[in-house]
Amino acid sequence: MKPDATPHDIFAKAAFRNPLVYRPFIREHTPPELLGHIDTSKIEVMPVGFPLSNPLQAADIVLRAPLLNGSGWVYWLLEVQASRDSNMALRLLLYKMEILKYHLQSEQGRHNSKPPMILTTVIYMGLHNWQPSTLDPFAPLDAPLRDMARAAFVGDAEFVNVKQTDLATACDPAIQTATLLMRRAYARDKIKLLQEAGPLLQQVYNKPGGH
């Protein structure tokens, strides 16, 4: 508490930290099919040290609650915006990554490998009219690239099992080089490693766009 904090400041801080304040809003802005699976009696406001969650320094609030069956978590990001921001969609994407990082490092995240659901609401309180056409961060891309970028961001990553990769028949020199380096990462004979990797690196360098 700051030495010059007024009773109003103290009350405001206590009110913002009280999850009961947000229950009506959450019930209204959470999809009904999801709301029935959430233990709303355990909604909590994230601690002051959490990114974006200190109401006395920023109006943005992050809350969370477990699912009724204990299988996962739901987070709500309430982004209170006082001015128009053309980068709002990208900012929200960064905030979601912060929430995900926090969750993975928390006790709950370490004991449950399932990703949390993150629901986001932008509450605009600016004086000037602002109605963004979309808050989809991938919207500026052309249609084919937009779908591809969205799928690449949230979809499956490509998995290459080095032990099942035939180094001799791998067609791409860059893949051959990476595979070789990974296999020999702890090799004591560094000279042999350089001798084997040298020709492959030269091929990568000579490829169009390789340099």
Image (spheres, grey):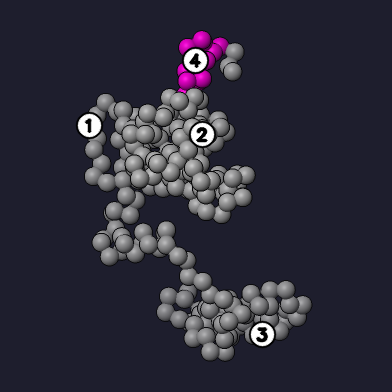
Specify the amino acid type for callout 3. Answer: Gln
Indicate the secondary structure of the residue bearing disc 2: helix
Are the residues tagged 2 and 4 within 8 Å (C-beta)? no
Q: Earlier in the sequence, mark 2 or mark 3?
A: 2
Judge left or right: residue 104 versus residue 137. right
Cα–Cα gap, marks 4 and 3: 70 Å
Label 4: which residue?
11
Specify the amino acid type for callout 4. Answer: Phe
Residue 155 pos. (x, y %):
42, 62
Q: Residues within 10 Å of mark 1 (few under 14, many from 20)?
A: few
Q: Quadrant of residue 131?
A: top left
Q: Earlier in the sequence, mark 2 or mark 1?
A: 2
x 68%, y 81%: residue: 193
Specify the amino acid type for callout 2. Answer: Lys
Indicate the secondary structure of the residue bearing disc 3: helix
Cα–Cα gap, marks 4 and 1: 31 Å
Label 2: which residue?
42
- What is the span of residues highlighted in magenta in the rendered image? 4-16
Q: Earlier in the sequence, mark 4 or mark 1?
A: 4
Label 3: which residue?
195
Cα–Cα gap, marks 2 and 1: 36 Å
Cα–Cα gap, marks 2 and 3: 61 Å
Queried whether the magenta region covers residue 9, the answer comes back as: yes
Cα–Cα gap, marks 2 and 4: 22 Å
State whether the magenta stretch is mostly helix, strand or loop: helix
Label 1: which residue?
129
